[in-house]
Amino acid sequence: MTPEQILEIPPRILTRQQREFFFANGYLLLERVLDEEWIARLRAATDEMIERSRAVSKSDSVFDLEPDHTRDHPRLRRVTNPAQQHPAFWAYCNDSPMPDIVADLVGPDVKFHHSKLNFKWKHGGEEVKWHYDIGFFPHTNYSVLTVGTYLYDCGMEQGPLGVIPGSHLIDPLPTQYSDSGEWAGYIQDRDLAQLATDKAVYLTGPAGSLTIHHCKTVHGSKRNESKVSRPLLLNTLTSGDAFPYTVNPIYPEHDQQMLRGKRPRFAHIDPRACEVPPDWSKGYTSIFALQQEAAAR
Ligand SMILES: O=C(O)CCC(=O)C(=O)O
């Protein structure tokens, strides 16, 4: 569906102004929209995941670990597919206001693509370089977005998500391959000049706030040198009529499950081309690992 068609449908939660802001700017910050019960449930599930990580000493398909992670001092970069690691994260995708908010932005048929729980641990949690998501998982159209959920207060010191307003309207966006033709997973320095990085907006907010970014919005985040870790739960959802045409890098068991509405019988095909990623069926680690490897090369 196009933004115009979506706006014709009465909203469930968002105001018309919020919906229009998202379509014009490619992001939205919704402060404190989750109630205490959801925050407590997601925090408890996160704590359980951290406990489980103590038994792991090397990154695997669930835990992406910082190099100095230990049993006594866990340091996680990411939990991959939290929605299949703990029922609370999957319940959040189905039973919370989050998918209804997404329906106001992609239309009534809302589909799950994947989830991840990014940490940015205290005292040095890593930077995420400027990139856009749709290059990791191209779809037949761009009605694809990611909802970030702050489980704790996130200020400037914790490395909040930063977005470049309006970058989702740039076509084509710069490549995410390096000059030597290898996948980098971020925009090369020389191309950053065409983007208004000086106008980046950093989405800080109290616990229970949501950040929403469009799949073409250029975004990234700085290191967290503070004394407080920054868990950020990310869920990528799509319009029902957006179908991926490359392998889902992290093979979630809930991939393509409808969260709201029904599965459309036809794909909506947007003619704007999207650069495709490498063949993820040959392996994928995480954006942190991939960006660090590419920068080291
Ligand atoms: O964790 C962050 O700050 C950003 C993560 C991100 O952009 C991603 O995982 O694609």
Image: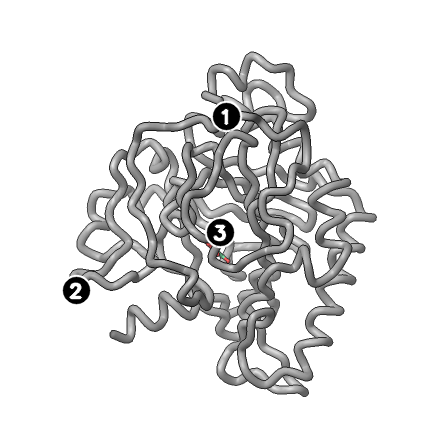
Q: Residues within 10 Å of mark 2 (few under 14, many from 20)?
A: few
111 or 267: nearer the viewer: 267
Q: Is mark 3 within 8 Å of ligand 1?
A: yes
Q: Earlier in the sequence, mark 2 or mark 1?
A: 2
Horizontal relation, residue 90 to residue 243: left or right? right
Vertical placement of residue 46 versus 56, above or below: above
- The picture places residue 177, in percent across and down from the top left corner, at 25, 57
How many labels were placed on the picture? Answer: 3
- The picture places residue 68, in percent across and down from the top left corner, at 52, 85
Residue occupied by mark 2: 180
Residue occupied by mark 3: 161
Q: Earlier in the sequence, mark 3 or mark 2?
A: 3
59 or 33: nearer the viewer: 59
Residue at 50%, 39% in the rendered image: 145
User: Callout 1: helix, strand or loop?
Assistant: loop
> In front of the other: label 2 or label 1?
1
Residue occupied by mark 1: 266
Image quadrant of residue 69? bottom right
Horizontal relation, residue 47 to residue 295: left or right? right
User: Callout 2: helix, strand or loop?
Assistant: loop
User: What residue type is disc 3 on?
Assistant: Leu
> In front of the other: label 3 or label 1?
1
User: What residue type is disc 2 on?
Assistant: Ser
Real-space Cα separation, disc 3 to disc 2, in angstroms:
29 Å
